[in-house]
Image: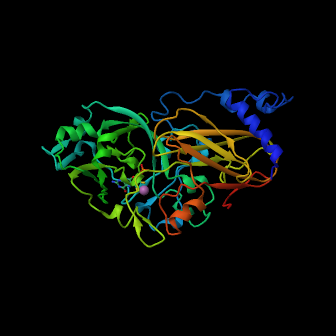
Amino acid sequence: MADLKQNRRNFLKGTALAGGALLAGRATGAAAAEGDPAILDIQPWAQQLGEGVDARPYGYPSPHEKHVVRRSVEWLTADPVSSVNFTPLHELDGIITPNGLCFERHHAGIAEVEPSKFRLMINGLVDKPLVFTMEDLKRYPRVNKMFFLECAANSGMEWRGSQLNGCQYTHGMIHNVMYTGVPLKYLLEEAGLKTNAKWIMPEGADASAMTRSIPVFKALDDCIVAFMMNGEALRPEQGYPARLVVPGWEGNMWVKWLRRIEVGDEPWHHREETSKYTDLMENGKARRFTWEMDAKSVITNPSPQAPIPHGKGHTILSGVAWSGRGTITHVDVTIDGGKNWHAARIDGPSLDKSMHRFYYEFDWDGKPLLLQSRAVDSTGYIQPTKDALRAVRGENSIYHNNGIQTWYVNANGEAENVEVS
Ligand SMILES: Nc1nc2c(c(=O)[nH]1)N[C@H]1C(S)=C(S)[C@@H](COP(=O)(O)O)O[C@H]1N2
Ligand SMILES: [Mo]
């Protein structure tokens, strides 16, 4: 483990870098090597013509990236149609989740909705019940907003101790996407909310007909009926042709394949807000309606699926942080299990209820590391330790685990999921 002096030095370097200084004298490029065939030989791709512009009408990644895929945990569920797969966070950088890599959570498989048969009904406590087609929706003013969606069960398997080896599995029930769609407020206003309208109940068109109760204040604030993600039509997996976006709130409320929104004066207490998506406390009572996702972060590199490949020396640590209550104002990082904390550098857009990317550059002495990150959001909330969460919530929880994650890195640079107290 690095000693205190070592860490102070790293801290100063980290600060200098955050100030924009370059890594003077620490360049990692190798000196020009004589006779390097990768430089001198004419490579296959330069010896023949490549494919033309007619070869790939819809592009796809390089064959060298074929390991960058969503993955599932086999023992987690009995059947893939009511299951989950995970975003490969350790293979991504920046803040955008590519459409083909967004984790999926379905209760009854992927509904293949025919867009010409899409109908969105608004009924219940409204002046005039309305039905919208896709064409109708596309004639309302639309907005473009980037938001994370995190399943409330993300990190749920870790509640009783470290279990899964990889941030894809411990933290990959999240994606961060730019949505294009119509503010729900415009549609509700057109239908005209009655004065006693306090709740809405979005319903999915899939075989699970998923429903959740959402308070009207949220529906009128920032919910969106989205039909595009990252610039193209929603993928079937994500609710094509339209899904509800409920910024900062648990993923279960973001109803996919939207078909109906009922307006009422009280919540419906359906399955997804009673038997599921409630938190069983120590005293046997269940906490319900925990909508907002608290600030959370994870180091994506290094991590169990992404060891340090280069041995000691200049090392880039990277990760993501998010909060359902606003932006992330800082992320602190420790490489010695919490003895010393260093300010990480947040890079890229800092948007409300969206993922943030952070980096911490340090000189690795080649000794084992205990890595942790801790996010602070714009409300001043500080991401808690897992022990602090358990002290308040007991041992029975699954959902809403935003505790600090620890990776142990050995002298070979291999990482493992552990807990320190
Ligand atoms: N209609 C419908 N909507 C749904 C679901 C579903 O099974 N059916 N799953 C919910 C859950 S539990 C989550 S976490 C998110 C997952 O969204 P994603 O598949 O885009 O990742 O969608 C939510 N919306
Ligand atoms: Mo979920």
User: Which of the four quarters of the rendered structure image does ligand 2 lie in?
Assistant: bottom left
| In this picture, residue 300 sits left or right of residue 1 | left
Q: At 26% across and 51% down in the image, what residue appears?
A: 200
Can residue 282 be seen in this snapshot? yes
Residue at the left extreme, as displayed: 128
Residue closest to the eye, 231 or 36: 231
Q: At 30% across and 62% down in the image, what residue appears?
A: 270
Residue closest to the eye, 138 or 343: 343
Can residue 67 be seen in this snapshot? no
Quarter holding residue 180: top left
Residue at the bottom extreme, as displayed: 284
| In this picture, residue 115 sits left or right of residue 177 | left
Residue 186 in the image: state x and y as whole percent: 25, 36
Residue 217 in the image: state x and y as whole percent: 30, 45
Residue closest to the eye, 344 or 117: 344
Q: At 63% across and 48% down in the image, what residue appears?
A: 373
